Image: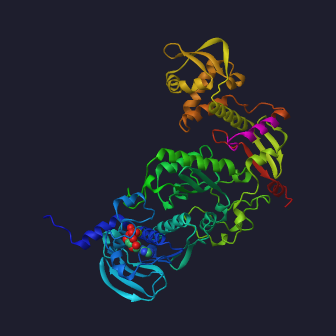
Amino acid sequence: MPIQQLPPHVAAQIAAGEVIERPASVVKELVENSLDASATSIAVSIREGGVAEIGVTDDGCGIAPDELCLAFRHHATSKLATVEDLNTVSTLGFRGEALPSVAAVARVVCTTRPTNTESGARIEFRYGACVGQWHQGCPPGTSVQVADLFGELPARRKFLRSAAAETARIQEVITRYGLAHPEVRFTLSVDGREAISTPGSGRLQDAILSIYGAEVAGRMLPVSLTDGEVAVDGYTGAPDLNRRNRSYTTLLVNRRWVYDRSIYYAIEQAYQGTLPDRRFPFAVINISVPTDQVDVNSHPTKREVRFRDGDRLFSRVQRAVREALIAHAPVRTAARSFAPVDAGPQPPASPETPRLPAINVTLPRTDAIALPRTDGIALPATALAPTEGSFRDVLAGLRVVGQIRQTYIVAEGRSGMYLIDQHAAHECVVFDQIRRRMQGGRRPSQPLLAPLTAELSAAQAVTMDSYADLLADYGFVLDHFGDNAWLVRALPAELAARANPDPAVALSDLLDAVAVEQVVMEREDALAATVACHGSVRAGMTLAPEEMDALLRQLETTENPHNCPHGRPTVIHFSEYQLEREFGRR
Ligand code: ADP
Ligand code: MG
């Protein structure tokens, strides 16, 4: 074929493919426009997965009739004027590509009226060609109706999935933007049925409640961290509220819904050890950064952004989520940990934690994105506040009753019975001591009367090489003694006190264990966890009442008393309600 320049409408339809991939992309672009127009209410309706019809109506600033035609031209935008403006752009759109792209691949009718004018205007397009423009009376705001998407582009339509699958993607867009903008009232109607409705109260809790329901909302923990110009805020789920994939983690940057692999990872890292394998947290996290610190113009659909200082952001997000978990995560209850994670309706909460009054029988599985949850809306806002007190409060109120199987401590607390895993709890305490000591720079170590030679395996020697500096910080005094042999001159105090009396064996065990831990933990934590584990009270040890009591008091002071460094829970709660129910008293 000879080279020829494509006619403009063919070029436009091809270029539109970059922006408009499927019905959900139309919804995303139109909703972003409504948000940029400062709408307080956005109503979306779709039919047949959005292929037959998509309508987006807002009460935003509207478009002046004499600019309406221009708005549908390529690179026509009111959001920036120069390249430099990209540094400060705070709107979701800025390329001026959405409206022309939608108009190129569907039949489009747009009616609009700016707030300050008497009458509105209407413009119509058919697959790129303008049909006409008229005066039209309409309420202030903008309404865009899109019909027969890809109707003249069978090649594009072929790639769409079933109506149900396309609907799910649209629901996802409304879910994410509903969470991103709690101040806006969103409704989504699917084939005439209301599927999502957010109250627009401005409170993220309310948006979460209306989208995911009370069961989820009641177990979300507030996240809030400000560090210089960066703020991280939102809600993150208690660890038992986990899901099979990442679609329940909503990541927002300056309230723009984005995907960022490394920040997702930061959120998951914060849960380290508290989530079962291949389970993902429930979270809505917004990162506020100065606009010049983030490049929003790096991806065709603006789905990904680039950060100027990604590493620092990573650690801030991780810290923010971790702090939320440590400060607010409730004590794990026996019922919850016994029930399969996705087993539909959960057993009723205890009367001391009345977070789900009377509605739990109707709770559906929340695994599908954005289940319509209108029944949760009537719940009072206090339903979101954990009422059983913080973990530390619970620990402080415990009275030791005894020990069973030389493994578990039995205690009574203000809302039932608590079982404490003595090894996990002590590990937690020792781990904390080690970390604090490292931060304080002190390293009590216990010298050996006579140095001992440790013969290491080749694998252990490799671990030794990468940990030599940290081992020294921890209180090991070691001298390389040719090939894979090392001379042990002193041990960390914790190890000397408890561990295997043979320091060479202790060192070799430690290196083996740290090699395993380092797969899932940072280098520092891997070593601290290993030393903690080796220096801790084992299961199978009889403890005196005072020792048990002391252990609980120490656990109370640790930074993260919920879990041992490997993620096993330290305490399990059997509520009074559960006990009474089991004994048939209720
Ligand atoms: P962009 O959003 O990148 O500017 P669009 O093609 O999406 O480009 O929109 C072009 C222009 O039309 C916008 O800059 C805005 O001025 C106007 N516009 C589009 N949608 C709306 C709306 N819902 N309300 C008010 N103005 C709108
Ligand atoms: Mg736009």
Residue at the far top in the pictured view: 450
- Say if residue 108 shows up in the picture: yes
Which colour scheme appears in the figure?
rainbow
Residue 112, image x, y percentages: 43, 81
Q: Quadrant of residue 373?
A: bottom right
Write the start and end of the magenta stretch as one range.
548-563
Q: Residue at x 51, y 51 (%)?
A: 264
Q: Residue at x 49, y 85 (%)?
A: 139
Residue 289, image x, y percentages: 50, 54
Q: Quadrant of ligand 2?
A: bottom left
Magenta segment's dominant SS is helix
- Membership of 561 in magenta stretch: yes
Residue 372, image x, y percentages: 59, 70
Q: Is residue 262 above or below residue 2?
A: above
Q: Is residue 238 above or below residue 427?
A: below
Residue 458, image x, y percentages: 49, 22
With 497 as the anchor, is 451 left or right in this view? left
Q: Residue at x 20, y 69 (%)?
A: 6
Q: Is residue 192 above or below residue 540?
A: below
Where, quadrant-wise, is the C terminus in this rendering?
bottom right
- Membership of 318 in magenta stretch: no
With 231 as the anchor, is 377 left or right in this view? right
Where, quadrant-wise, is the N terminus in this rendering?
bottom left
